Amino acid sequence: MAKLSKRQKLIREKVESARAYSVDEAVALLAELGQTVKFKESLDVAVNLGVDARKSDQVVRSSTVLPHGTGKTVRVAVFTQGANAEKATAAGADIVGMDDLADEVKKGNMDFDVVIATPDAMRVVGQLGQILGPRGLMPNPKVGTVTADVETAVKNAKAGQVRYRTDKNGIIHAPLGNVEFTAQTIKENLEALVADLKKAKPASSKGVYLKKITISSTMGPGLTIDQGSLNV
């Protein structure tokens, strides 16, 4: 039998697998369990939704601007031209262009985390689907990354907007911050996400919608959250 590491022993001692934790308790416990980790761990959430992910009308795809961001610097590329290019740059976009930007993408030069496009630029962006799609970078109107309002889209992306969609098991995954965030900050980010998930509930979804919410750190366990501790 393999010997348990110090961290594994701590997890076994401290984590009650059948328990639902308040956000405060979960954040404190994950921080305690991460004391042996040599880097700043991220905190992420997984939400099991009461949807049938096999049905196209029950796919949940949306975005949320977290009130406290994710703690990460986000580089934004915008496909647009003319006055919108000036607005995008003024709003803080890192890279702005059209065909020239498309050429850079085709060469593999993709030093950005989010791609935004105005509707008129989709003729150019559409040709990049096989490159951007697998990386989760393809702009989509459902998450606000295909829009005429590039100024707001860039500001939202820079502020920590997270995009998500249900996987084949009906689960969405999103970052909430890192272990240096206060419990209240994580809670407010989670409440914003849950509020938007409720708004995005498919009309055809029946029964319990928010089935389970789990918070985890990069190297830590998943802790079930007591939904009654959320103000949503």
Image (cartoon, grey):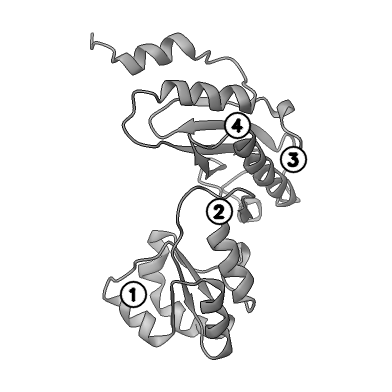
Q: Which mark is residue 105?
A: 1
Point 59% across, 21% down: residue: 25
Mark closer to the chain start, 2 or 4: 2
Furthest residue toward bottom: 82
Above or below, comparing residue 163 to residue 26 in the picture: below
Distance between the alpha carbons at the discs numbered 4 and 3: 32 Å
- What residue lies at 72% left-to-right and 34% top-to-bottom? 208
Of pointers 1 and 4, the one earlier in the residue sequence: 1
- Residue ID for mark 2: 162
Q: Image check: 165 left or right of 208?
A: left
Q: CA distance from mark 2 to mark 4?
A: 19 Å
Q: Quadrant of the C terminus?
A: top right
Q: Is residue 144 above or below residue 81?
A: above
| Residue pointed to by mark 4 | 183
From what the image shows, is residue 118 above or below residue 198?
below
Q: Amino acid at mark 4?
A: Ala
Q: Nearer the viewer, residue 28 or 208?
A: 28
Q: Earlier in the sequence, mark 3 or mark 2?
A: 2
Q: What whole-number distance in Å separates the C-alpha atoms at marks 2 and 1?
A: 22 Å
Q: Could you tell me which secondary element the residue under label 4 belongs to? A: helix
